[in-house]
Amino acid sequence: MLRRITSFIAHALAILALVILFAWVAGRIATDRWLLTQFLFWIPAYAALPAAAALAIVASLPRVRRPAPDSESPRRRRSRIALLSLCGLIAALGHVLVFEWRLPWGSSEGGVAASAPQQTLRVLHWNMSTVDWSYYPDSLDLPPAGERPVDLACITRMLEAKRLDDVIASVASAGHPPFIAQHGLFVFISRYPIIRSGSAMLALADGESTVGTPPEWAQKRFNQLARFLKLPERSFDLAEQGSIIFAEIDATPVVGRPVIVWFIDFPSNPMLHRRAVASIAARRLGLLRENGWLPKSPNPAIPGPDILLGDTNIPRGSGSLSLLAPGMTHAFNQAGMGAAATWPRAYPVFHVDHIFLAPPFRAASYRILDRGVSDHRLQLADIGLR
């Protein structure tokens, strides 16, 4: 009887390992094409793969009491299932290391033709939402101490005016006051002249992308976890419209012409189907561009800007991001490396803040930095010409 129970448990563990692996792979293949696969895609590799590996290893362990020869077949079948799980796990791990973390070829150079500091544009993006600014440090070090100044900072601010002044001071170089364009909570801080800028609501909460709001118990648990992690508490029944803020920066001294930047911010409700959100946003952005309000890259092959950045609340690798940035490349894919994630800041799991670049621009470096405040980590990229 004991042998049958242990055999059943071992079979169940082996099958569960395969189920976890299958769910993770299905999420990686379909990403957010459907709502169900969206949630599968959100399963972190470092949660799914170790769990499946542990189950497969335990299932493959020999039993204390060896079964009789006529019972050998179930044991072998269990071992085959466990072996299949382990082989799948090895392949999945290789995919993560090579294609998601870019470990073999991650580079700080990024193939930029001339990567000297004066020939690249240093761009910073940071969603500075926070719970309690009593945690605010004496110095934000934007950029890190000893490094060259930031040329363009794109900030989502949820802080008092004095704190914004601190950010402006940390971005500006000595004797060179920055140019500033502010639209509501969104701020451009630039070392180069801002030729024009503007903002608009995208009206994303129109029912097309919403499948409902989380139940009350789920919101309560989320906010309990948020308080523990020092993250902002959320009420997901509030309609979030999404925003687009643009700026034309006269970066001629660096790249030889003005640069068009689109700064976007999308809803955070976890029950929204991200592909539907991206599809609606792409249509709205297209209409704003076609009526002449929203400027685009001078590259005729690119329907969008030179630089698209912001907090999309859509993880990197999601298929829906291609709807927002057609013809553009994520700066991480050109110059990043490792398990990059921006949210939540204290224990980052998801890479939801992005910088996309259109040709001929390319990232010479891409980093994610923790400054000890906000619930997002910041992005810092050096951008030059190919």
Image (cartoon, rainbow, N blue to C red):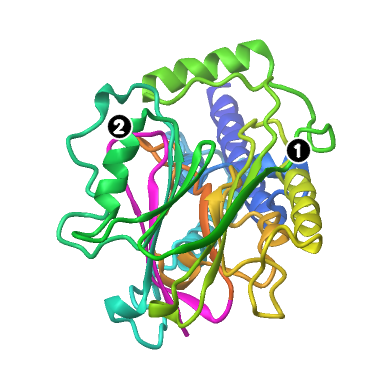
Three-letter code, disc 2: Lys
| Vertical order, 122 against 77 (above or below) | below
Q: Quadrant of residue 28?
A: bottom right
- Picture coordinates of residue 237 (x, y %)? 69, 19
Find out whether the residues at labels 1 and 2 contact each other: C-beta distance under 8 Å.
no
* Residue at x 81%, y 56% (from the top left corner): 287
Label disc, if present, on residue 162 of the rendered structure? 2
Q: Quadrant of residue 262?
A: bottom right
Q: Residues within 10 Å of mark 2 (few under 14, many from 20)?
A: few
- Picture coordinates of residue 37 (x, y %)? 72, 44
SS type, badge 2 = helix
Q: Is residue 371 visible?
A: no
Q: Quadrant of residue 128?
A: top left
Residue that mark 1 sits on: 203
Three-letter code, disc 1: Ala
Give the magenta-colored segment's residue range. 359-386
Q: Earlier in the sequence, mark 1 or mark 2?
A: 2
Image quarter in which the N terminus is found: top right
Magenta-span inclusion, residue 348: no
